[in-house]
Structures are given as structure tokens and as C-alpha cells.
Image: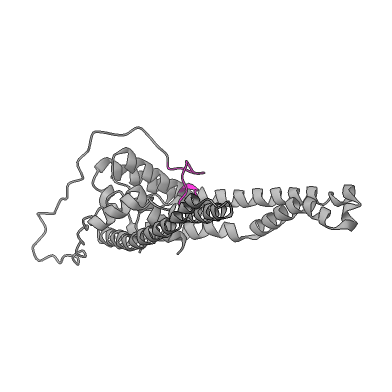
Amino acid sequence: MALLPVSRATLESDARVLAAVRTIGARHGVDYTDDAAVGELLAERRAAVEATQRGWPAWVGGLALTAGIIWPFAVHMVPSLAAELPVSYAPAGPLLVIAVAALTTLRQRWKRELTHRTLVGYREVLGVARAHGLPVTHIPAWLEGKSYGGTGKGAVPVPTSPPVTTAAPAPAMTTATSAPTSTPTSAPAPAQVPLPPKPQAVEAYERMADAGGWHDEVGWLLLFAGAIGAGYAWREEQPAGLAALLLIPLAFGIWLAGHRQGKEKRRLRGEALAYVHAVTHAQASGAPAPELSPVLRRLLDEERGTA
């Protein structure tokens, strides 16, 4: 079960969006209001997109590019080749041509999978939902042709259109009053799981997710500065310079603070993942899911990237 960018419950909250989505689905041959079908579609197309990165063009292109770049430097390390430089450089050109051809083929295959008609239609659905102000929980990086956790526009971004401000009421649910009371009814729908409130731990993770990361570098810098400064003071017989030794315990203090912050961040990350999973479970039961914050989107994208 995966968190969908937008669910049927969210699409049904605006009659205009629902009508537009059904039109898009009819044009592309997909029912984009069927959450189960959309989940299977995204999983299948993602696998197809990622498979293009493992084909022969990736191997041939990568190896040829590496060999073409290294070859001119390698000839200087072999005396027998260095004596014949004009001949030794010759293989580099063809290798680079092969690399460019293979990598171009790789990108064409990747772009062709990304522009599959079902994905084109789904990006249209997301664009319509955003234009009408409906919450889109997240947009997977691969769906827009970005690397995991990447930023920027992407190769195939979700189309944008001017926002629609006037809300339309959802279609009214009607019941047949003329039907006899003895007519059997269909099985009741599964109970909807309530959307969980965002815990304070998740809000704390959102605040500190991008904090830190400098403790190791500063700690080593202070350690080296203290050791070098004290060594220089001892050699030059300047006792006052031995005060640089105070930088060494300061370095260990910074490392300890970084360790504590990293431990707390890992704990809060687990809380944030649990919250995202709870939202996913609620969405699967029919509850409209909220838009995730940029930090939670990145967390979800990283988890899927390592899956």
C-alpha cells in the first residue's frame, strides 16, 4: 500500500474536478478515480522507468565514457604508449562517441517511459487538482523525471494552470425512493479510518530535519587547530600558546552535541514515518489525505528510493 498523490475521496470533493478527471480518464483509457488501479499503475510504470537505468545503454555508456576520459591520462603512465602519443590518443575519440550514443539512447528510453500515455494523463489529473486547490499529498520525484530528493522543474513536470478560486459543491448523493424496502442492498463499505492529527514529534522533525551536519567538520577543525597550535607554542617556548589545547575538549563537546542531535533526529524520523504510514492507511480507507510538507515529501521519496 502506497500513499497516492490524490485519492478518489479528494477528487470527489469538487464536482468540476471529478468531471475533468473522468474526461481525462476516458481520453487515456484509465479510471483515475479508482485508487487501487492508480496504485497498481504507478507501481508498474515506476518499475518500467527505473528498468531503463539498468539496460545495456547504461553499462556501455558508463564504461565507454570512463575509458574515454581516463585513456589520455593512462598513456602517460605507460612509457611504451607515451612514446607514440599521436597513436595513443586515437581510441579516446571513438570511445567518447560510443558513450554519447549509448547515453543518448538511454535518455530516449527513459523519456519514452515517462511520457507513457497513462502517466501523461495522471499528471494532467494532478494539475487539475492543484489548480482547483485540492490537496495533493506529494508528487513522486520519478513521476516528474527528477532524481530522488531532487529539486527543480524535472524533465516532465506536472502541468500548471491558473488557480480556480470559486469552489463547486460536490455531487449530491441521491437514493431511489420508489424502490421497495425489501430490495437487497450491497455490502457496506469498509469503515473509514480517521485521519490522524500531526503529532508534535513530527512537527519537531520538520523543524530540525535540515539542521546539523556541521559538527563533524567543525570538530575535526578545532581538534587540528588545537593540536597544531599547542605544538607550535611548545616548540617556540611560548606557554601562552598552550591555551590552544582548550580547543580539543571543545571539539569533543561539539562531536557529542552532534551525536545527540543525530540520535534525536533518527528518533523523530521514525515518528514522522509512522505518521506518513498512518496517513496512507487512512487514505486507503477512503479518507482524503492532506498535503504533506516539503520535509515529509522528501522523507517519503527517500523511503521509496531505498525500497
Rendered image quadrant of residue 188 = bottom left
Residue 206: image x %, image y %? 32, 51
Residue 174: image x %, image y %? 15, 50
Query: Is 234 placed left or right of 77 in the picture?
Result: left
Residue 247 visible in the shown view:
yes
Q: Main secondary structure of the magenta part?
A: loop
Foreground: 304 or 254? 254
Q: Which residues are magenta?
A: 144-158
Query: Is 3 placed left or right of 46 in the picture?
Result: left
Residue 262: image x %, image y %? 38, 60
In reply to whether residue 225 is colored magenta, the answer given is no
Residue 161: image x %, image y %? 38, 34
Rendered image quadrant of residue 257 = bottom left
Quadrant showing the C terminus: bottom left
In reply to whether residue 147 is colored magenta, the answer given is yes
Q: Residue, x 82% and y 56% (percent of image)? A: 77
Outermost left residue: 181
Foreground: 177 or 253? 253
Residue 142 visible in the shown view:
no
Mark count: 0
